Amino acid sequence: QRIGYLALTASILPGCSTQVKTEKIEKQPNIVFIMTDDHSYQTISAYGHTLSQLAPTPNIDRIAEQGIVFEQAFVENSLSTPSRACLMTGLYSHQNGQRTLGAGIDTTQTFFSELLQQNNYQTAVVGKWHMQSEPKGFDYYSVLNDQGEYYNPYFKDKGSNGEFKQEKGYATHLITNKSIDFIKNRDKDKPFCLLVHHKAPHRNWQPEPKYLNLYEDVEFPIPDTFYDNYDTRCEPAHVQDMTIDKTMTYVYDLKIYELADVKPYSEEWNVEGYKKEVTDQMTPEEIEVWNNAYHPKNQEFLKNKDSMTQDEILRWKYQRYLRDYLRCIKSIDDEVGRILDYLEKENLTENTIIVYTSDQGFYMGEHGWFDKRFMYEESMRTPLLIAYPKKIKAQSRTKALVQNIDYAPTFLSLAGIEKPKEMSGTTLEPLFGGEKPENWRTDLYYHYYDYPAIHQVRRHDGVRSDRFKLIHFYEQDSKGNYILNCNEFYDLEKDPKELNNLYNSKEYQEQVAYLQERLNTYRTQLKVDEY
Ligand code: SGN
Ligand code: CA
């Protein structure tokens, strides 16, 4: 077994150096990886978006102050379990098996946690695991049931024979408690790797009791693309099912339980459904606090609703959505602060790499949407902030293209472990100095597979370079004939909001052809089997 130190210089090896230098010893760093579920970069102050100025995230920003902000961090497949599989394996979805939300990960693949464990690390994962297979390569785990619940959630611990037990409290807080307890109780002679996987701010955005009224007086600005009519696009943007206008439900998403049995809203959600999905796991005291918060606001809305225009109603829904979402973020931010405080108090900051990210991005009303899945910026992009004082200069930023398949190789390289040859991702360590190495990748591959499924986003793959994006939406019938075969191309510098599909524009034929060639190369080299 290895001890917790790595000899860095080769000078002690015979024949490597003429002079024997003082042996420089470096300790394997601890890793604290905090990943939320559906947290948009638009709602983290360090990214400077107007939304986050109204609802700041001072604690997540501490990571930015101490470290590096990745301004172009992306996922390969904007969905929970696929993203988690990319994280664990450093492989693209078609390589690790987890293409859709329900597909199982190929458990014969190596998880980076196993390699850390074999190389001296104590490993743990707490919170949303979501994949059907048991966490592999962890000394300790306490994971939520599937998507998990916000209030008094059920956890399954390692060694509990698969049994879930309900715990009292709010998920974001409980997950942090368990995380801190793991650090507290660890073997202090060994490095540790802790994955803190929050449930929040996943749909249906249930805030913590103390924040149920936060931001009630704040009016969040409507995004420029809120009324997008998807002109110039292929069919998928038109036929998705994820608009605030039509898809978001009054009862489940917007918590107007007063409408539960009122037609036409009773089709999907009635009082029973609301109780089951929203308040079922709350204590009577929590239900009272919850109802006291929502009821007066709901009454106010219902009083005015009949005299409101469709657009006023839509804007009201947007405000309720944003407020609840950002209330969940407020709890996340508090709890990130608690972890950072604990690491500081224990003098662990210097030798710990702290990562903050999300399993993908999210629409905060851009294009009229919530949810994710599309290769457009808001969902393909994800927040990524890393602090590691030993190697990362405080307050640095980078525009280098990075992807969620890079986490596993990064952790391995930091721990001094050689990356398995088959891992597709690449370590982010060369970017830590703030400079982008000349040979850094110039584009990324994306592939979304989960169709037919909730929200009805069609399958697509594509390439994103620093400036351009090519997307190919596809579907073939059983004979291999295309039912859907449509391309989009965006100039992100001139059109960062992706409103103008230039695929057929004469002016861009050269750039389109270049990205098409890159896409073909990815498909061939990565052995992609559908597109
Ligand atoms: C649930 C949500 C969807 C969401 C998926 C995937 N519906 O099905 O809105 O897209 O999860 O989310 S809900 O009615 O159950 O809230 S993911 O983060 O796990 O990928
Ligand atoms: Ca998610």
Image (cartoon, rainbow, N blue to C red):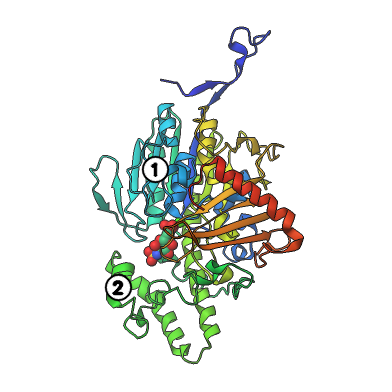
Q: Determine crowd level at label 1: few under 14, some 14-19, many 20+ residues with C-alpha closer than 10 A.
A: many
Look at the picture and state if 46 lies above or below 194.
below
Residue 165, horizontal then vertical, whole percent: 25, 52
Disc 1 residue type (three-letter):
Val
Q: Could you give the CA–CA distance between mark 1 and mark 2, rounded to whole angstroms?
A: 32 Å
Q: Mark 2 points at which residue?
A: 273
How far across and down, in percent of the image, does residue 314 sit?
A: 52, 79
Q: Name the residue under label 1.
A: 125
Q: Measuring from the top left, give residue 257's x and y in whole percent.
A: 35, 78
Label 1 beta carbon within 8 A of ligand 2: no
Comparing 527 with 131, the one in front is 527
Q: Residue furthest bottom?
A: 307
Residue count near mark 2 (Cα–Cα under 10 Å), binned few <14, some 14–19, many ≥20 = some
Q: Does the rendering let one see residue 162? A: yes
222 to 32, vertically: above or below:
below
Residue at 45%, 66% in the rendered image = 456
Q: Quadrant of ligand 1?
A: bottom left
As helix, strand or loop, the secondary structure at mark 2 comes to helix
The N terminus is located in which quarter?
Answer: top left
